[in-house]
Image (spheres, rainbow, N blue to C red):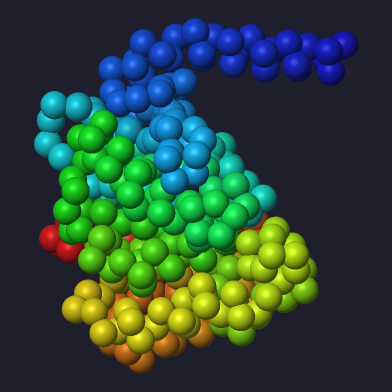
Amino acid sequence: MRRLFRPLIAFLYCAATLAVAPRAAAAVGNGATAGVTTAGGSMVQSRSLRSNALQRDWSYVVYLPPGYRADGPRYPVLYLLHGNNDDAMHWVTQGRLQTTADTLIAHKDIPPVVIVMPQGGTDWYVDRKEKIETAFFTELLPTIETHYAVSGDRKNRVIGGVSMGGFGALRYAMLQPERFCGALLLSPAIYSTEPPPQSAARHVGVFGERQFEPDVWHALNYPALWQRYLSQPYRLPIFIAAGDDDLVIQAEASTLYTHLRAAGNPAALRIIGGGHNWDVWAALLPAALKYALACTQAGG
């Protein structure tokens, strides 16, 4: 009998949420589909935009901090990219982002911030299967800056990601460092040589037409951007972290950290107990947010 009631309870909860949410969400921006508030006053919205680059509707999730006002001061904005087997809402449901951000803001550990989490599918955030990198820079950023009270200045924009999203976040940070003042990378899938056999990068049809092509991987991975990044006048503080059981990833994270510090680039490294999962990433998120968002308070 208990098993029969669980689906009914879940259905009624979702129906109630969707019934009350649109009124709160529709006041801001385009395409609101749902809003969830908390006792702390923050809100999470699921929204979408029509993407010409992707030739389809593109959905994303937005966290609005407690006390958010569309007609108030401009907020810093953080873009978080999810991993290969996840979706954007997992930052909230698995990573506890909403409660974590609420707590950090209440304790004044981070400023009130708008957090945007786009759906990345299995595109690895590069212009291969779809033009998702183009869509990010030419459509998502302008849409967020039009429909939300966020700053369009580099000193108030931060990028981050987990696993596949860490690959994308590091690529975006090094490709266009003039856009961001900081970055956070949780268990980033940034294999400096080639992905191991079990990596999704070899099997999702992004880095090769029919099978994995090493040349494509190397052309899109961060080492190919290293000299270009170092030639720019910008240095992003980068928070890098992984679980100690995630052997290849934590080794790659340590390598990146060493290279950044050797080049005089601010960086922090955290290795904690655990593997490649949301238990680790949720535990790392408070420190990651505090480090990466510090640049917005320091003026970038």
- Position of 120 relative to 191 (above/below): above
The one of 98 and 300 positioned closer to us in this rendering: 300
Asked if residue 75 can be seen in this view, the reply is: no
- Position of 92 relative to 271 (above/below): above
Residue 244's x, y, as percent?
63, 72
**Residue at (59, 75) in percent of width and height:** 216
Asked if residue 192 can be seen in this view, the reply is: yes
Looking at the rendered image, the quarter that the N terminus falls into is top right
Residue 50's x, y, as percent?
43, 33
Looking at the rendered image, the quarter that the C terminus falls into is bottom left
| Total number of numbered discs in the rendering | 0
Q: Which quadrant would residue 183 be assigned to in this image?
A: bottom left
**Residue at (47, 76) in percent of width and height:** 222
**In the image: residue 54, left or right of residue 6:** left
The one of 87 and 67 positioned closer to us in this rendering: 87
Question: Which residue of the protein is positioned furthest toward the right in this rendering?
Answer: 1
- Position of 129 relative to 89 (above/below): below
Residue 121's x, y, as percent?
60, 47
- Position of 272 relative to 165 (above/below): below
**Residue at (32, 79) in percent of width and height:** 229
Residue 13's x, y, as percent?
60, 14
**Residue at (51, 66) in percent of width and height:** 167
The one of 287 and 13 positioned closer to us in this rendering: 13
**In the image: residue 273, left or right of residue 8:** left
**In the image: residue 262, left or right of residue 250:** left
